[in-house]
Image (cartoon, rainbow, N blue to C red):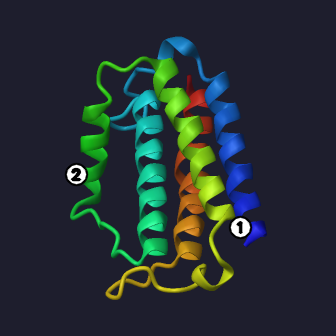
Amino acid sequence: MNRLIKKFKSVRLEFLAEVQTFPVNERTEKLFDKWSLQDVLVHITAWDMWTVEVIEDFRSGIVPYWPPSIDGFNLAAVADSKGKSWDDIYLELVESGALLIEMCKNIPKDLWNKKIWLNKSFTVTNLLNTEIEHYVKEHLSKTLNTMKEN
């Protein structure tokens, strides 16, 4: 599982490095379909914190919350962030990722591949792999492509 945590840390650090080079004056422009880069950071933070809560509940024997609508979850997170500064949003992103990494480091080996929900196939391993894939295929590639276009 250390390999998986290292991979997550690696793609996350690569994304954070790209975010730092993104033009400051374009960070709040709607360049990613209906979202700005700031909105993308809020989205990532929300899912990181959801994953932390899932792992905490799972480890405590509580059935974790599953959002009824992914789009609704994303829209609510972005709406809740309105009025926050770039610096606050960026700090929340950094902190949520660090918390998720620390949480993963402390998961007992026997829980990594155990189903979290009875009616879903997700395990902690699946969740972290999904996060990694989402970074690589969505956030990192779109951020790089958008920077090249502008």
Q: Is 104 displayed left or right of 14 in the figure? A: left
Distance between mark 1 and mark 2 Cα atoms: 29 Å
Provide the secondary structure element on which disc 1 rests. helix
Residue 138 percent across, percent down from the top left: 52, 51
Q: Mark 1 — residue?
A: 4
Provide the secondary structure element on which disc 2 rests. helix
Residue type, label 1: Leu
Q: Nearer the viewer, residue 118 or 106?
A: 106
How many discs appear? 2
Residue 77 percent across, percent down from the top left: 31, 41
Observer able to see residue 45: yes
Q: Quadrant of the C terminus?
A: top right
Q: Which of the 4 image quarters holds residue 84?
A: top left
Q: Is residue 98 above or below residue 89?
A: below
Instruction: Name the residue located 71 percent from the left edge and 42 percent from the top edge.
Output: 13
Q: Nearer the viewer, residue 49 or 133?
A: 49
Q: Mark 2 — residue?
A: 72
Residue type, label 2: Gly
Q: Nearer the viewer, residue 22 or 84?
A: 84
